[in-house]
Amino acid sequence: MEQKSIVIVTNDDIPGLDIIQQQVQDDGAGAISTFSGTTRNTFQGKCVVQLEYQAYTGMAEKVLVQLIEEARQKWHIQHVAIYHRTGVVPVGQTSVVIACSSTHRADGLHATEYLIDELKARCPIWKKEVYEDGSVWKGSCC
């Protein structure tokens, strides 16, 4: 069976986790490992109102596909989905989801951790944190 790689960088809401899990489901996989990143309400003691993400979408998608290929070389994973939201993401809403199906849980868990860490380090997606007191922090990715 061919391995699926789903990579979506979008200004729209990210689908529910149940939908994304269905996209990576495989009858030969005993595990589906996921990571969901949400906007939290504080950062370094400041009250966060929202995050705003900007991306170089075409390049971000290419980097994410490359990261999936790298993960496949390290671990036995079947299907992978990575969704990243751009634009304003209010507190409590999801900005990123990664899902991996794998025969055994360890491979999926390691691959998922690798994918989020490398996404944050290498993907051209930037965030702006907007605080209640009006201050703004800009940083690279997630």
Image: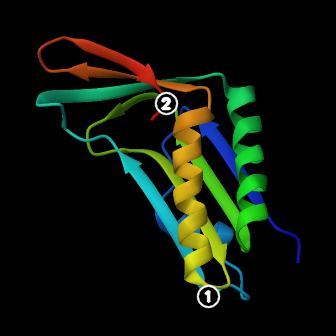
Q: Amino acid at mark 2?
A: Cys
Residue 60 position, x and y percent, is 68, 32
Identify residue for label 2.
141
Q: Nearer the viewer, residue 125 or 117?
A: 117
Q: Is residue 81 left or right of residue 90?
A: right
Classify 90 as above or below 107.
above
Of residue 61 and residue 91, the one placed in the foreground of this image is 61
Residue 69 shown left or right of residue 125 in the figure = right
Tag 2, which secondary structure?
loop
> Of marks 1 and 2, which one's residue comes earlier in the chain?
1
- Which residue is at a point 34% across and 44% down the rendered structure image? 93
Residue 106 in the image, given as x and y percentages of width and height: 56, 78
Tell me the quadrant of the picture where the N terminus can be found: bottom right
Relative to 121, residue 16 above or below: below
The image shows residue 82 at horizontal and vertical percentages of 61, 51
- The residue sitting at the front extreme is 74
Q: Is residue 34 toward the left or the right of residue 139 in the image?
A: right
To which quarter of the image does residue 25 belong?
bottom right
The quadrant where residue 123 appears: top right
Task: Name the residue type under label 1.
Answer: Gly
Q: CA distance from mark 1 to mark 2?
A: 31 Å
Picture residue at 58% right of the left edge, 44% below the top:
118
Q: Quadrant of the C terminus?
A: top left
Residue that mark 1 sits on: 30
Name the residue: 68% across, 27% down: 57
* Count of residue discs: 2
